[in-house]
């Protein structure tokens, strides 16, 4: 990015520095005035669209107070560069054109003299510009997963479908690629695959940063914002966490904040409100994560503004080792039956089955006030997981999806190392969009099924390999992955282990990196070993083996769909009986897939490999 920025160091205020030694010229249109060891004013005097702020990832946040015509406009936290510039983040000046703009910057490094402070790299590297280059050529930038153009993303939230458009809002830091400055970023799509990036939807205000929440359509105008309004409820997070309402009258582009906020307050930490229309009771319901109490609070309301607490679900149930966050609750049909059940999603961090973040769920009944979970034969409420990888979190569904669909998307990372993964100008992507269903397994329990949304099929580019049957034994059978697009592909295959011996499906490259996936029919498990997958040393929590139950009999064939992007692999059992999402950072793209069955013989049937286009390019 630096390459595209042409710095002119001539300074219009050249004379000023002699009179006032603390005033220093930076770029054209930027003047820097050092006031003390930790306080500097950056004056922007330019008609350009952006002030580009220089960031050094390893530095601490500076507090940047944006002062316009003497009034505090907003405060953002930016890792302003000390010794080197890793990348730039843009501060939009568009709303301030013709006004006096000063950044009152408070840094946090300890130093003894102003002279030391003046040496920070950032002061001479602020730039005003009409453009901000978002083309990102980073090696691990996903080719076909939604990801922000720059900056940090965590939870998908507030997703709603309206008039043929899937709106995806997400927890977003536009001023750096680590968690901070939470706003709702916004992308939209008509096909869940090709995403258009929009300006920020909701920014922090006096009540706090904008944490996760949900959105609904309100066709009967119960809230009084109009019957075509999108109504959103999110957590305002500052010293406390309270729930704030906003609505959009322009199809989700901009939001008006409700002047009566907050609409829900509690004396303890509660966040991520997820609301939905309950047709059976003719009222709105809302789940709120009572994070530290490890329970979900259930509310109801006639008008989205006045909420009554009905009950609390979950104390002592399921996984309890971390905070409970990002709930969801909806009804689904059990595959092949007339039965309907409610599924309650509870994201938990830490406490996932492989460490850190994960998504658990409960199956049960819901009467508008109380969720009653199903029990197993021993009378216990079983702990169930929606995905058996390490990188599937904050998964919630779209409101008002068409055709009775229950479409979800997750954050493809884990709080254990999300801020350390080897990307720079952006961090994190979403999972593929997925469809939820329910199936009854042989243990009599009802589980969620997860399949890629049907739109995902359109990612297929060329069929690069097709084998109706390959026999695999001790010696691996090797097939090349598409070479022309960094090996980005979808792999479909059926594994018939014949004698019940474990079968290995391995992705590898010439650098010695590999991912070993093993179907073990006698244990009904599928494991994913990424300990040698490439770059793994950025966190001790990253190298891992994850395991999924296959719900299969010893002699059954396992049908799989595997999606390989530049830094992730998602595995789905073809009917959705398990899903597994894991990040990988190969030092070079995997260029080969091999099959082996040590200790037996196996057949790989119906192998098809499709290359996938880079749609983020
Ligand atoms: C989950 C979470 C939410 C919160 C958001 C803040 O990842 O911790 O509970 O609203 O992230 O960004």
Image: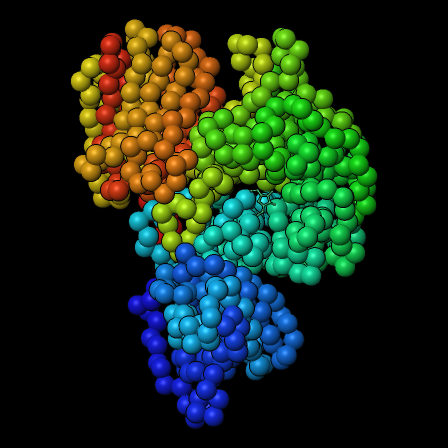
Q: What residue appears at the point 44 percent right and 17 percent down from the top-left corner?
A: 550
Q: Is residue 534 visible?
A: yes
Quadrant assignment for ligand 1: top right
> In terms of image quadrants, where is residue 596?
top left
Q: Foreground: 109 or 105?
A: 109
Tell whether 142 sits left or right of 409: left
Residue occupying the point 30% across, 26% down: 516
Look at the image and tell me in which quarter the N terminus lies: bottom left
* Residue 230 visible within the image: no
Is 405 situated above or below 73?
Answer: above
Q: What is the quadrant of residue 118 in the picture?
A: bottom left
Left or right, 319 with reference to 53: right
In percent of width and height, residue 128 lies at 44, 75
Q: State the residue at coordinates (38%, 17%).
A: 558
In the rendered image, the residue lying farthest to the front is 112
Q: Return the x and y of residue 515 as percentages of the image width and height.
A: 30, 30
Image position, residue 60 (x, y; %): 47, 59
Apparent side of residue 250 relative to residue 545 in the rendered image (left or right): right
Front residue of 449 and 539: 539
């Amino acid at each position: 990015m630096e390459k595209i920025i042409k710095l002119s160091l001539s300074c219009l205020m050249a004379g000023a520095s002699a009179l006032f030694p603390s005033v220093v010229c930076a770029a054209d249109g930027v003047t820097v005035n050092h006031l003390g060891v930790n306080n500097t004013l950056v004056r922007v005097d330019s008609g350009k669209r952006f002030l580009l702020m220089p960031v050094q990832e390893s530095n601490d946040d500076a507090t940047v107070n944006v002062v316009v015509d003497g009034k505090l406009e907003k405060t953002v936290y930016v890792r302003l560069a000390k010794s080197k510039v890793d990348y730039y983040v843009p501060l939009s000046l568009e709303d301030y054109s013709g006004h006096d703009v000063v950044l009152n910057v408070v840094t946090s490094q300890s130093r003894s003299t102003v002279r030391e402070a003046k040496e920070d790299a950032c002061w001479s590297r602020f730039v005003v510009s009409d453009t901000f280059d978002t083309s990102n050529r980073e090696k691990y930038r996903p080719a076909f997963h939604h990801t922000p153009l720059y900056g940090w993303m965590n939870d998908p939230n507030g997703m709603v479908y309206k008039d043929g458009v899937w709106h995806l809002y997400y927890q977003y830091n536009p001023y750096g690629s680590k968690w901070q400055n939470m706003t709702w970023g916004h992308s939209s799509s008509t096909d869940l695959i090709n995403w258009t990036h929009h300006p920020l939807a909701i920014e922090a205000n006096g009540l706090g940063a904008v944490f996760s929440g949900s959105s609904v359509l309100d066709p009967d105008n119960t809230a009084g914002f109009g019957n075509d309004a999108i109504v959103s409820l999110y957590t305002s997070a500052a010293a406390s966490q309270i729930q704030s309402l906003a609505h959009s009258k322009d199809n989700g582009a901009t939001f008006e904040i409700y002047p009566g906020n907050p609409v829900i307050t509690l004396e303890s930490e509660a966040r991520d409100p997820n609301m939905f229309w309950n047709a059976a009771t003719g009222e709105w319901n809302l789940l709120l994560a009572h994070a530290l109490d490890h329970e979900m609070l259930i509310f109801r309301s006639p008008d989205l503004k006045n909420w009554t607490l009905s009950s609390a679900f979950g104390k002592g149930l399921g996984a309890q080792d971390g905070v409970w966050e990002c709930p969801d609750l909806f009804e689904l049909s059990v595959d092949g039956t007339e039965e309907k059940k409610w599924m309650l999603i509870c994201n938990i961090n830490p406490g996932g089955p492989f460490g850190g973040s994960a998504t658990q769920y409960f199956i049960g009944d819901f009467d508008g006030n109380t969720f009653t979970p199903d029990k197993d034969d021993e009378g216990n409420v079983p702990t169930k997981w929606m995905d058996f990888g390490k990188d599937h979190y904050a998964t919630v569904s779209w409101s008002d999806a068409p055709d009775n669909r229950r479409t979800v998307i997750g954050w493809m990372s884990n709080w254990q190392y999300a801020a350390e993964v080897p990307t720079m100008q952006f961090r994190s992507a979403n999972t593929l969009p997925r469809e939820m269903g329910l199936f009854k397994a042989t243990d009599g329990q009802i589980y969620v099924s997860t399949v890629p949304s049907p739109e995902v099929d359109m990612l297929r580019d060329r069929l690069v390999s097709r084998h109706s049957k390959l026999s695999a034994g001790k010696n691996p059978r090797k097939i090349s992955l598409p070479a022309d697009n960094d090996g980005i592909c979808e792999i479909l295959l059926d594994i018939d282990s014949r004698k019940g011996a474990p079968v290995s499906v391995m992705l590898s490259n010439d650098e010695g990196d590999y991912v070993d996936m093993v179907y073990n029919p006698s244990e009904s498990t599928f494991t994913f070993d990424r300990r040698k997958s490439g770059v793994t040393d950025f966190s001790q929590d990253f190298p891992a083996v994850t395991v999924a139950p296959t719900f299969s009999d010893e002699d059954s064939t396992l049908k799989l769909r595997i999606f390989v992007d530049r830094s992730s692999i998602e595995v789905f059992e073809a009917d959705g009986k398990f899903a597994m999402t894991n990040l990988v950072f190969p030092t070079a793209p995997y260029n080969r897939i091999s099959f082996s069955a040590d200790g037996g013989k196996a057949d790989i049937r119906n192998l098809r490999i499709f290359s996938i286009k880079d749609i983020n390019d």
